[in-house]
Image (spheres, grey):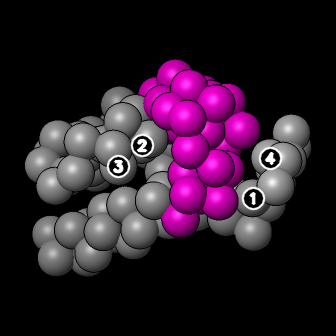
Amino acid sequence: MPRRKSYSDTFTGEADKNIRSILCCGEESQHARLKRILLKGINNEPTPRKKEIIVLYYFRGKDTTEISEMLGVSPQAVSAARARARLRLFRILQYYL
């Protein structure tokens, strides 16, 4: 079965915007604290694959299709791993906040 060249994950748009806004431009004290917590959560990610996907998506600005081509997996696998990692990050934030 051939791989799709395009993959849309628009259903996660709002959560991704919130995480990106915290990671990219948080200089206020509250944003700095959230950014520190998120970075600790990312660094403590249990699997290297999820950590790599999070770094590529949120810090390097790659989309799901580009990441899947780089890692040699399907876009659905990238989206699922990112969703699980994002859920874990939200749980970490809930614990600290």
State yes or no: discs 2 and 4 in contact (Cβ < 8 Å).
no
Who is closer to the viewer here, 88 or 65?
Answer: 65
State yes or no: discs 2 and 3 in contact (Cβ < 8 Å).
yes
Whole-Å distance between the Cαs marked 1 and 3? 17 Å
Comparing labels 2 and 4, the label whose residue is closer to the camera? 4
Q: Position of residue 60 (x, y in %)?
A: 52, 23
State yes or no: discs 1 and 2 in contact (Cβ < 8 Å).
no
Q: Is residue 54 left or right of residue 94?
A: right
Who is closer to the viewer here, 57 or 68?
Answer: 68
Q: Is residue 56 left or right of residue 94?
A: right
Q: Quadrant of the C terminus?
A: bottom left
> Residue at point 48% right, 56% down?
82
Q: In the picture shown, does residue 60 fall above or below 13? A: above
Mark 1 or mark 4: whose residue is earlier in sequence: 4
Pointer 3: what residue?
50
Whole-Å distance between the Cαs marked 1 and 4? 16 Å
Q: Amino acid at mark 1?
A: Asp
Comparing labels 1 and 4, the label whose residue is closer to the camera? 4
Q: Position of residue 31 (x, y in %)?
A: 34, 45
Q: Residues within 10 Å of mark 2 (few under 14, many from 20)?
A: many
| Prevailing secondary structure class for the magenta stretch in the rendered image | helix
State yes or no: discs 4 and 3 in contact (Cβ < 8 Å).
no
Mark 4 or mark 3: whose residue is earlier in sequence: 4
Q: Quadrant of the N terminus?
A: bottom right
Whole-Å distance between the Cαs marked 2 and 4? 22 Å
Q: Which residues are magenta?
A: 56-80
Whole-Å distance between the Cαs marked 2 and 3? 6 Å
Pointer 4: what residue?
3
Comparing labels 2 and 3, the label whose residue is closer to the camera? 3
The number of discs equals 4
Pointer 1: what residue?
9
Q: Amino acid at mark 4?
A: Arg
